[in-house]
Image (cartoon, rainbow, N blue to C red):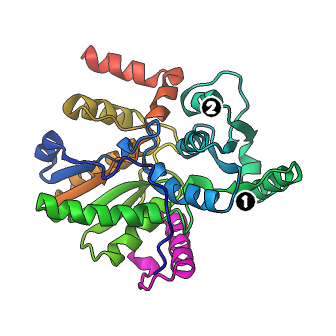
Amino acid sequence: MIFPEKLNLANIPTKIIKLCKLSKIYGANIYLKRDDLTGFLTGGNKIRKLEFFFKDIIQKGCDTVITCGGIQSNHARATAVVARRLGIDPVLILRGDKTSHYSGNLLIDKILGAKVITIDHQEYKRIDSVLKECSIHLKADGKRPYIIPEGGSNGLGSFGYINMMKELKKQMKEMSIEIDSIVHAVGSGGTSAGLVIGKKIYNIKADIYGINVCNDKEYFVKRIYKIIMEAKRKYSIDIDIKSKELNIIDGYKGLGYAISRDEEIELIIEIAREEGIIFDPVYTGKAIFGMLDQLNVDKNRFGENILFIHTGGILGLLTKEKEGKFSQIINSMDNF
């Protein structure tokens, strides 16, 4: 196996804490991996991946990084923060409407001076071509660009969570616990791919469950498996993984990507008040809702010891006030 080099950017190892009140309510030991605290302005799971990408960027002598995502992309914002720290120019191609009123991740992007290019949903369907075209234009201007795919999800990016599984194995030994299941939100597939590969490499018994926040199970099984196969091929990883081994729990994307149902918002508020932990409405909020809903049906669904990975995304919460739903629900809960 060829383990690619990385920069040391993240605040790791991230802590594992037990959510005692939720554990009592749902009849299982629920632990939380605090990957929302990796640093770089709430970089979340993205920083683990970017350690590998930016090492490659520096080694190749690139001076500009191009990446993409939704208008409130956590990945795009994290990329821009790291790029500025390392003296590299960030170019962000974002799906959504052009605006002069900035909030959340987009506000940070603009504060950082990232070049933001907005495209509509239809054009975003050909995002790989758009990224390549942007790279060609930058090269014509004398730049040395480097493309990071959506979510940092490719073979190289998967090493962020291959590395995390090595970290987890050590933590389980230190804590004298054996995790039965690892549950996480799935948005682009790279984190899932790394977890599955890492499970095999480091011989971790825990089952891996991804809860998709967009698209469907079939889409993500194909996408994750493709990333796994790319990583195996490029980095000579000698493990056997079949697509049928990928566990995607479908049915919790709700009203769609970044659109919140009242019950999801209520759960985010309830957990914040019970545990002092805040999940975002786009990724972790939907995933924790799905996990707990599964436990409501069967408290043994994930075994005795469950680890939920908090992948960050808190800035996505700060864009929700314009919808008014959080205020309405908070007021209704407080007035009950």
Nearer-N-terminus badge (1/2): 2
Residue annotated with mark 1: 128
Front position in the image: 309 or 35: 35
Residue annotated with mark 2: 112
Front position in the image: 49 or 314: 49
Residue kind at label 2, given as amino acid type = Leu
From the top left corner, tell me how far across and down residue 70 is, in percent: 62, 43
From the top left corner, tell me how far across and down residue 67 is, in percent: 66, 50
Q: Residue at x 63, y 42 (%)?
A: 87
Front position in the image: 57 or 263: 57
From the top left corner, tell me how far across and down residue 212 is, in percent: 45, 55
Determine which quarter of the picture holds residue 271. top left
Q: Residue at x 21, y 51 (%)?
A: 31
- Disc 2 residue crowd, few under 14, some 14–19, many 20+, Cα 10 Å: some
Q: Is residue 304 visible?
A: no
Determine which quarter of the picture holds residue 83. top right
Q: Residue furthest right?
A: 140
From the top left corner, tell me how far across and down residue 326 is, in percent: 41, 24
Based on the picture, tell me whether residue 304 belongs to the magenta stretch.
no
Location of the C terminus by quadrant is top left
Based on the picture, tell me whether residue 227 belongs to the magenta stretch.
yes
Q: Is residue 218 visible?
A: yes
- SS of the residue under disc 2: loop
Q: Residue at x 11, y 62 (%)?
A: 176
Location of the N terminus by quadrant is bottom left
User: What's drawn in magenta, residue-wise?
Assistant: 217-245
Instruction: Say whether residue 315 is left or right of residue 180.
Output: right
- SS of the residue under disc 1: helix
Q: Which dot marks residue 93?
A: none
Residue 241, compared with residue 46, is above or below; it is below
Q: Main secondary structure of the magenta part?
A: helix
